[in-house]
Amino acid sequence: MPSSNIAIIGAGIAGITAARTLKAAGHSVQVFEKSRGSGGRLASKRSEMGRINLGTQAFSSDDPLFLEELHAWQQVGWVQQHHSAGQTYWTGVPYMSALTRQLLGDLNTDFSCHIQRLSHDSRGWLLHEQNDRAHGPFQQLIIAIPAPQASALLNSCAPELAHQADSVKVQPVWMVALGFKQPLTHNTNIKCPSNQAIADITVTPLSAEHPMQTWMLRARADWSSKHLENQHDDVIDALRSAFSDLLDSPLPLHDSAFAHRWRYALGALKQPTTALYEQQRGLYVAGDWCGSGDVYSAWHSGKNAAQQLLDHLHCTTIAHL
């Protein structure tokens, strides 16, 4: 028997938020994550340029409950608040994935554990890895992963939930980082015309943690879809060229570069929901794609999935009294 009767698949913001909510309510939780670290689209990468955020560069929200949480995280040094052009946004300290590691804390987590199949019987849920090693049984299960991966996992055991996840039209995104030991002097507020391959540009200045000025180029979703299977070097060359076209002088040769492909970057349900579930079998699904596809949606969905689970357990306990 497991040390916990609740399992969570996915250690992004949605999964971690669900786990923290359940732990705060007195439950022991086991988290499974296929990657080597936490973060999901808040992941970061060590490089010659320093630690670089691979996905979300910053996030914002006007939800009072989430803002209350963000200010609590700010008090302990997990996030920083920034103001630009009349808007407030937040970043992890010192990088995005550090936030998720702080949030994960001492939660029981199995990293590099790719759950590829689920099964359910009278004992509960079994989680099967590629080598068919099984974890469980668990009486309650929260799946907090991108919609296409959730659909594949649910297809054989919960087809109705799989169908809802499959309805999400997910788009990929390429990210390219260019590092320069000699900082560029161009305007850091470069706007990306609609006919360019680049959707957004973020610059990280030189610092003790970043030995190069780094320009992160986020490709447009339509461009990324068209070039989804391109080689990394070809993507770097293409986005570098598009970046150069935006400048008022030739772009010097970069000192370092890498590309990262997010196959499941953008997408959300047509009708947002807080969470999908089959309470009788103890199955819940969460993720940013249940809302608007942003960090707040991931937090909100994870929190609500956990609350739905807690409410069901409470009702079940009362019914047995």
Image (tube, rainbow, N blue to C red):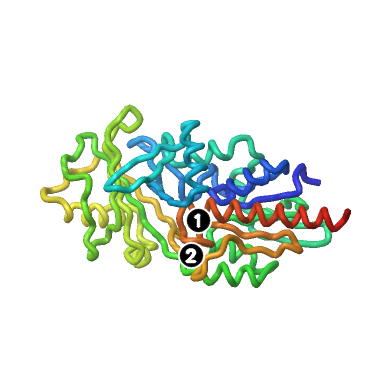
Q: Callout 1: helix, strand or loop?
A: helix
Question: Which of the two labelled residues, at mark 2 and mark 1, occupies the earlier sequence position?
Answer: 2
Write down the residue under mark 1: 297
Residue at the image position 23 percent from the left and 42 percent from the top: 254
Which one is in front, 204 or 182? 204
In the rendered structure, the answer to whether residue 295 lies left or right of residue 310 reads left
Residue 262, horizontal then vertical, whole percent: 43, 56
The quadrant holding residue 282 is bottom right
Indicate the position of residue 249 as horizontal and vertical percent values.
11, 48
Which label sits on residue 268? Answer: 2
Measured along the vertical axis of the image, is residue 41 above or below residue 167? above
**What residue sits 24% from the left and 64% below the top?**
194
Extreme residue in the top direction? 208
Q: Residue at x 32, y 42 (%)?
A: 83
Tell me if residue 301 comes above or below residue 53 in the rendering: below
Q: Residue at x 20, y 35 (%)?
A: 182
Kindly indicate whether the residue at mark 1 contacts the one at mark 2 (C-beta within 8 angstroms). Answer: yes
